[in-house]
Amino acid sequence: MCNKKETADTKAIGIINQHNGIIRTKEAINAGIHSRTIYKLRNEGVVEEISRGIFRLAKSKPISNPDILTVAMRTPNGVFCLISALSYFNITTQIPHKVFIALPKGAETPRINYPPISVHRFSRDSFTQGIQQENIDGIKVNFYCPEKTIMDCFKFRNKIGIDVAIEALKFYKSRYKLDVDKLLKYARICRIENIVKPYLEAVI
């Protein structure tokens, strides 16, 4: 019996390792790990539950961006946007006190106790455009690209502040290759082309 438990534990640890040391309960069960094994390993300190239903091996290297990864695993269909995306791409001086995530209109709001999240609803066209995948600790995470993020900031200027959008545009120009056509493309998708043109002309 002891050998069977050891085998189950070893198998579970191996599977979690295959998932870069972090796994959701659903993924674990689908991979053949019994829920009892997960909680046994948690109680023994082999794995730690970093958020409800998300486990990581205790001996894994520290997570570089735990808040982003936690929300990404809880909302795999979401896209990180606004301040969270600006911060990731290093085009803001803002420190996000919440994780900003975009969801399509009608999607269920995720129930996450921690970290605090700020959910923003996007139209179907706006939601699907400008997504790029980033690799964080071996996990694929969806962000809006810098150009789409900046245009979203102008669109949501009444919520996050026009100064945040202007600052991001200036940082973008200094740290990335300025792509006016791409910026205007996303401005049209966000239906703010006339609003943003004067700001673009000021930085060109």
Image: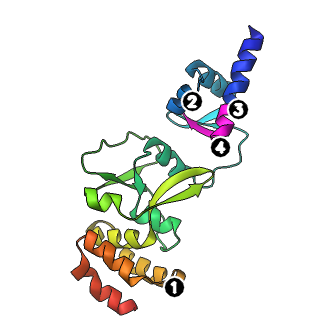
Residue 20 in the image, given as x and y percentages of width and height: 65, 43
Around disc 3, counting alpha carbons within 10 Å, would you say few (fewer than 14), some (14 to 19), or many (20 or more)?
few
Residue type, mark 3 in image: Gly
Residue at 44% in and 67% down? 145
On the image, the x and y values in percent for residue 180 come to 38, 83
Residue type highlighted by circle 4: Asn
The answer to whether residue 163 of the structure is visible from this angle is no
Residue range corresponding to the magenta coloring? 14-24
Q: Name the residue under label 1.
A: 174
Q: Mark 2 points at which residue?
A: 28
The amino acid beneath tag 2 is Ala
Distance (Cα) linking label 1 and label 2: 44 Å
The mark that comes first in sequence, 3 or 4, is: 3
Q: Is residue 147 visible?
A: yes
Vertical side of 168 occupied by 66: above or below: above
Between 97 and 189, the residue placed more toward the observer is: 189
Residue 15 inside the magenta-drawn segment? yes
Q: Which of marks 4 and 1 is nearer the N terminus?
A: 4
**In the rendered structure, which disc, 4 or 2, sits on the residue that comes first in sequence?**
4
Secondary structure at numbered mark 1: helix
User: Residue drawn 70% across and 23% down?
Assistant: 9
Q: Report the front residue among 159 and 186.
A: 186
Sequence-wise, the earlier of marks 2 and 3 is: 3
Q: Where is residue 201 in the image (x, y as percent from the top left)?
A: 33, 91
Picture layout, residue 143 above or below residue 112: below
Residue 14, label in figure:
3
Q: Which of marks 1 and 2 is in front?
A: 2
Mark 4 residue element = loop
